[in-house]
Image: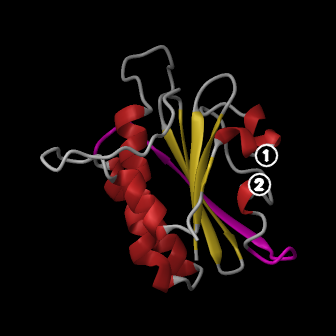
Amino acid sequence: MHETVPHHDLVHSVLEWSALDWWPPVGWWPEPARDLPPAVSPTQAATFVLPPKADSVHSARSFATGTLTGWELGEMCDGMELVVSELATNALRHGLEIGGRHRREVIRLALIRRGGFVTCALTDPGSATPVMREANPFEPGGLGLHIVESISVRWGWSPLAPHGKAVWAVLN
């Protein structure tokens, strides 16, 4: 089951954070995905800051793989590497205003585990809405969110106040 969740359906507590300072609060889980893990599952989280550089995507993949291996969820590594790559690339390409008004332009990556499910959440200071589009066969790229949708159980996004957004995907 793959389901894209519009931003207005997300938990309001996430909306209190700016993309510049959002870290997942203890026990955070995307509201539209709360039905996936057992209700009493303990939560583990790992976070990472990505500077606005192209090689940050590689660093994010390495961080995700190391985290999942440490959590003994190595079977998830291939799928998570793809999801992290796509979401981090989108955040770098569409979520940053290099030299823009935000002085601390970074992307934040959080991996949150509940039972056998792991949410990958990336925040960026951009205001652009993540949109799945049909890519031209002669155009490089444009399929990132299709890849995220095909690998994840559920994905979505939420605006963050006063600016920015969090884009997340749940894998199992």
Where does the magenta region start and end?
A: 37-54
Q: Amino acid at mark 2?
A: Glu
Q: CA distance from mark 1 to mark 2?
A: 5 Å
Of residues 56 and 130, the one nearer the viewer is 130
Q: Determine which of the numbered discs, if any, sits on residue 129 in the image.
A: none
Secondary structure beneath dot 2 equals helix
Badge 2 is on which residue?
A: 31
- Asked whether residue 63 is in view, the answer is no
Q: Is residue 47 magenta?
A: yes
Q: Does residue 28 sit above or below 113 in this rendering? A: above
Residue 39 lies left or right of residue 8; in this view the side is right
Assess whether mark 2 and mark 1 are in contact (beta carbons under 8 angstroms).
Answer: yes
- Residue at point 53% right, 29% down? 125
Specify whether residue 67 is painted magenta: no
With 123 as the anchor, is 113 left or right in this view? right
Q: Residue at x 77, y 33 (%)?
A: 16
Judge left or right: residue 137 versus residue 5: left
Q: Which residue is mark 1?
A: 11
Tag 1's secondary structure? Answer: loop
Which residue occupies the foreground of this view, 16 or 150? 150
Q: Amino acid at mark 1?
A: Val
